[in-house]
């Protein structure tokens, strides 16, 4: 296993993302949050967009998992070779790519992107279902992640993390590490994900999205 991935074993990865039109959507803000997460013990940062990747890479010592989201429908996480190459150029140590079988806007496939960038970077495959896991492992990716479960066809959206998906993925992924990502909202759930066999756990919203967290409190109080 690549040493950069080995150092993530059993660790927390923090996803620092602000969405279009949101008050925290600024590379400097994301870099500050990423650095704060690093000080808290995060082993890597996952982040979106070329400016954020560059700003965060310049601020933290830990590895950066970069992606580039374009659009909201269909394949929007690093949807082409061009997007993946740009993420590498911006400073990503690992590039996250949608691993679903859906065609990308430019007509290319997941395999096309993996083929083009493998050897230049480490690839994290954002999967929605077991078909994606099989596809990603066959393509030779470095990491499989449950990122898209509940957000693309294939699996129901679970209340918390999809731990059954983690277990099923671990059972077939062989030596390829499986990360648990998506709806991990509490430290206890992060622990459960490791117990389910996850190699590492990615937490975004519950650490870095104050608008959502505030809403959780408000809902509980109304
Ligand atoms: C489905 C999709 O587009 N997920 C994105 C992937 O980068 C992010 O919006 C999530 O915040 C990230 O996966 C972490 O998940 P959570 O925020 O639930 O901890």
Image (spheres, grey):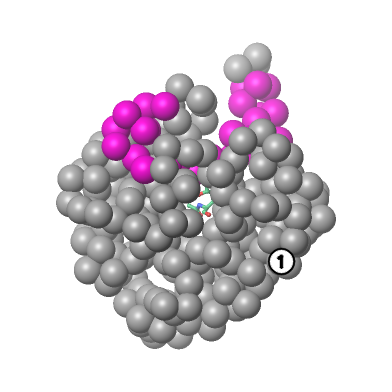
The region drawn magenta spans 191-219
Spot occupied by residue 88 in the image (x, y as percentages of width and height): 57, 74
| The C terminus - image quarter | top right
**Residue under the point 50% across and 63% down:** 94
**Local crowd size for mark 1, using a 10 Å CA cut-off: few (<14), some (14–19), many (≥20):** many
Q: Is residue 198 magenta?
A: yes
**Residue under the point 54% across and 80% down:** 85
The residue pinned by badge 1 equals 54
Q: Is residue 84 magenta?
A: no
Query: Can residue 74 be seen at all in this image of the molecule?
Result: no
**Residue under the point 32% across and 29% down:** 195
Q: Give left or right: position of 5 versus 69.
A: left
- Where 60 falls versus 182 (above or below)? below
Residue at the outermost front position: 3
| The N terminus - image quarter | bottom left
- Where 111 falls versus 76 (above or below)? below
Q: Quadrant of residue 199?
A: top left
- Where 92 falls versus 15 (above or below)? below
Q: Nearer the viewer, residue 51 or 182?
A: 51
Query: Can residue 166 be seen at all in this image of the molecule?
Result: yes
- Where 81 falls versus 156 (above or below)? below
Spot occupied by residue 119 in the image (x, y as percentages of width and height): 42, 78
Spot occupied by residue 167 in the image (x, y as percentages of width and height): 24, 39
Residue at the outermost left position: 172
Q: Main secondary structure of the magenta part?
A: helix
Q: Give left or right: position of 157 versus 173.
A: right
Q: Give left or right: position of 95 versus 150.
A: right
**Residue under the point 45% across and 85% down:** 106
Q: Give left or right: position of 53 versus 124.
A: right
């Amino acid at each position: 296993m690549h040493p950069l991935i080995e150092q993530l074993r059993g660790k927390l990865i923090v996803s620092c993302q602000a969405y279009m039109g949101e008050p925290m959507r600024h590379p400097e803000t994301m870099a500050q949050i990423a650095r704060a997460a690093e000080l808290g013990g995060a082993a890597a940062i996952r982040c979106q967009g070329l400016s954020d990747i560059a700003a965060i890479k310049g601020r933290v010592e830990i590895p950066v998992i970069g992606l580039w989201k374009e659009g909201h429908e269909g394949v929007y996480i690093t949807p082409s070779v061009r997007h993946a190459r740009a993420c590498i150029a911006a400073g990503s140590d690992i590039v996250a790519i949608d691993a679903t079988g859906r065609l990308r806007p430019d007509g290319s496939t997941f395999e096309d992107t993996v083929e083009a960038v493998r050897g230049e970077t480490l690839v994290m495959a954002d999967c929605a279902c077991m078909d994606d896991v099989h596809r990603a492992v066959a393509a030779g990716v470095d990491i499989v992640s449950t990122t898209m479960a509940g957000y693309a066809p294939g699996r129901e959206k679970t209340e918390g993390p999809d731990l059954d998906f983690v277990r099923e993925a671990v059972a077939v992924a062989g030596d390829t590490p499986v990360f648990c990502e998506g709806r991990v909202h509490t430290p206890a759930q992060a622990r459960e994900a490791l117990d389910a066999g996850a190699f590492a756990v990615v937490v975004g919203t519950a650490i870095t999205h104050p608008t959502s967290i505030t809403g959780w409190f408000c809902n509980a109080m109304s």
